[in-house]
Amino acid sequence: MANALESHKKEVDEVQTDPEEFQSQSSETDDESSTDHEKSQESQPKERPPNNRPPASRQATARTQRTGEPRDDVSRSKTQGSQPPGGFSLAGSNAFWGAPPSYGPYIHPEYHSYNPHYGNSEPGKPVWSLAQPLPHVVRDGMRYGALPEDRKEEEQEDGRSRPPPAAEEPPTGIPQTEEAKENGEELEPDGFFNIWSKVRFYAKEPFAEWLGTSVAITLGLCAGLSHYTSQGQAGTYASQCAAWGFSFMIGIYIAGGVSGAHLNPAITISLSVWRGFPARKCTLYVLAQVLGAITAGGLAYAIYHDAIVDLSVKSQVIQSKTTASQALLTGPKDFVTPVTAFFDEFLGSAILVGIILALGDDANAPPGAGMQAFIIGIVITVLLLALGYNTGGCFNAPRDFGPRLTVLMAGWGGQVFMEKNVWWVWGPWIADIFGGLFGAMVYDLAIFTGGESPVNYPPRRRKRALLIKEKNLRDKLHIGRHKIKDLEKAVEENQD
């Protein structure tokens, strides 16, 4: 019985981790007494010895550096760490009982002195990630004084500038004043191990997009090549669709916490237009995605080069005419008209982006932590099964452009960029990007209520922003400059 009591005490110690909030209940037993006497003896409460557990974890350290406030372990222990009466619940952790406390990985006391940037990654910076709910930011169309033209007008009127929009403000927690610098609070980019670690620190977002896109498209292309070069012996069309879906799921898990893992220009541009993703980053993200697709095309072609050559010999046709081209390149079937092919890609991209915005909308029904990438993988699989037959199911411009450029360098000939009436331009690029924008607009019109969407801008503010854009465009392109004064007058009439 004494052994059973000691075992019970250990279980209680593992659950009740806060020495200041909880006190363990133990029994004072006499080793020489009988079992009946042990059952009847009253337990005597005593204080637990102080918990000498080392300072918690990277998660707690990162939270402290991000918010400036230490983690409240006492309040956490009030809602977590206890089990429901009657034992373990098959429903898992819930709002009433919470999850057992987690302390994360062990961190050596001297680790931060050798790696000062551990857990210091730009606190307070929003990440438009496909792996978590999308951030809510204040955009230009939500308030007066946010556009650069507004701030210039304010400076001319009263000689002082208005604050910049939230998307341009420095991240919370990084001091910008001289007083903060004197107090040693400024986050200095020092302590790098070498030049490459410094480059990686400042270019981590494009590197993450490149790596996530490379891995996702490499796995998808290899799955397709294994199916087509084996003449159907390795997998089926359905398994190929699933491979593409879960390949992008893996890519999102790789880069989702750093760059957001867009992995698709249609997603990046749609998030910029409808959710406030910085427009200045779009070109860099798209370039990283294209480079990742080229890398993936090269890797997949190199791995399956022997299989492609063998298939070419057995089929007695050149490589570009084998079924391997269906794995590497997308394009409408011979019986599919250009209009049908265009709207096939348009519809698929619209559904994809619309679902991604729904998953990122915390006012809707977002999935649990870590589940968004998994659900996006399932969505891509379903889209390929439903809409992939007519055109090969691109829905992602670099997925077609990267391998197409690779096979051009492999000697397949320049016709790969001219076939199907230059399909690679009006299909994967134009149809997919405009389809994504349309799908996001439909979701915002029907469901989304956040102020960062242009759909929800105040009417006068939206009209004024469009007039300013038109005036600036005419001025830069020297087109219809005689109308600029009329536009300036219209801007003043729509002043908030």
Image (tube, rainbow, N blue to C red):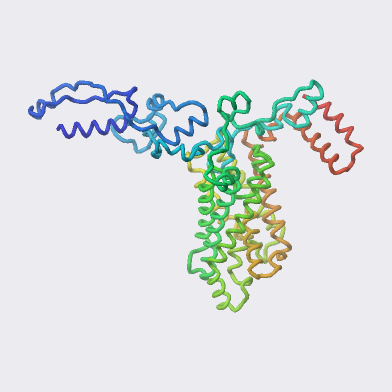
Which residue sits at x=46%, y=37%?
113
Counting from the top left corner in percent of width and height, residue 425 is at: 71, 57
Counting from the top left corner in percent of width and height, residue 37 is at: 10, 25
Counting from the top left corner in percent of width and height, residue 10 is at: 25, 33
Q: Quadrant of the N terminus?
A: top left
The reply to whether residue 144 is visible in this rendering is yes
- Describe residue 238's horizontal placement relative to residue 39 as left or right: right
- Describe residue 128's horizontal placement relative to residue 466 as left or right: left
Which residue sits at x=24%, y=31%?
9
Establish if 400 lies above or below 231: above
Q: Number of marks in the image?
A: 0
Q: Quadrant of the C terminus?
A: top right
Front residue of 386 and 264 = 264
- Describe residue 327's horizontal placement relative to residue 415 as left or right: left
Front residue of 196 and 447 = 196
Picture quarter containing residue 402? bottom right
Counting from the top left corner in percent of width and height, residue 313 is at: 57, 78
Front residue of 382 and 26 = 26
